[in-house]
Image (cartoon, rainbow, N blue to C red):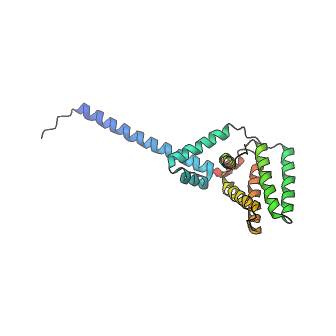
Amino acid sequence: MDLPAVSAGQMVAILICVAIAIVGAAILFFVRRRRTQQLRNQFGSAEYTRAMKEAGSQRKAESELNKRAERVEGLHIQPLASGDRVRFVDSWARVQARFVDSPGAAVTDADQLLSEVMSMRGYPVSDFEQRVADISVDHPLVLDNYRAAHQVALRQTRGQASTEELRQAMIHCRTLFEDLLREPGTARAAAAS
């Protein structure tokens, strides 16, 4: 069987097209890999993995994480005024002191205080899942703690949380509380390092 003769010029054109396709694929691969690494750094490995499991694919998870970041950029998150910071620190001290006599009520108060701090910073606080998604952008290292504390707070309202679980919830709440008191961006920088 005779193959049609391919001229040298056609062969060069084919090789150039193949080379362009290979270079384009390599660039796309590295851009995607870089974007993935940036999202892992911004949201933390645990939240990135959670998003992957929930979304079912890397592309969907990364799209969702990007949407979160864009949403939070539009929220005008702001630092606490020094007077507000002092007021919240004093409130936290009272909540912690209350734990000794009334652990369940203290956890409920801690959860409420976290909502107040978030609201003052500029985060919407009406829906817990949206709240978690929003704070994941700037405070990724404390998300699992916050989720766990919130679950204990919910179980406590039904009388199903042990004193040890309530103690752990207070520790988790304190971690997020301290993170929220930081300047915007410092928690994100800590997550990236």
Q: 106 or 8: nearer the eye?
A: 106
Q: Quadrant of the N terminus?
A: top left
Q: Percent from the top left, x then y, of residue 84?
A: 85, 45
| Residue at left offset 74%, top offset 54% | 176
Seen in the image, is 192 located left or right of residue 162?
left
Q: Percent from the top left, x then y, of residue 170?
A: 77, 61
- Up the image or down, 45 lies above or below 126; here it is below
Q: 5 or 182: nearer the eye?
A: 182
| Residue at left offset 30%, top offset 37% | 15
Q: 67 or 183: nearer the eye?
A: 67
Q: In which quarter of the view is residue 101 placed?
A: bottom right
Return the residue found at the far front. 158
Q: Percent from the top left, x then y, of residue 22?
A: 38, 41
| Residue at left offset 80%, top offset 44% | 80
Q: Please count the marks in the image.
A: 0
Return the residue found at the far left. 1
Seen in the image, is 100 located left or right of residue 51?
right
Seen in the image, is 21 located left or right of residue 59?
left
- Up the image or down, 75 lies above or below 156; here it is above
Q: Percent from the top left, x then y, of residue 185?
A: 70, 45
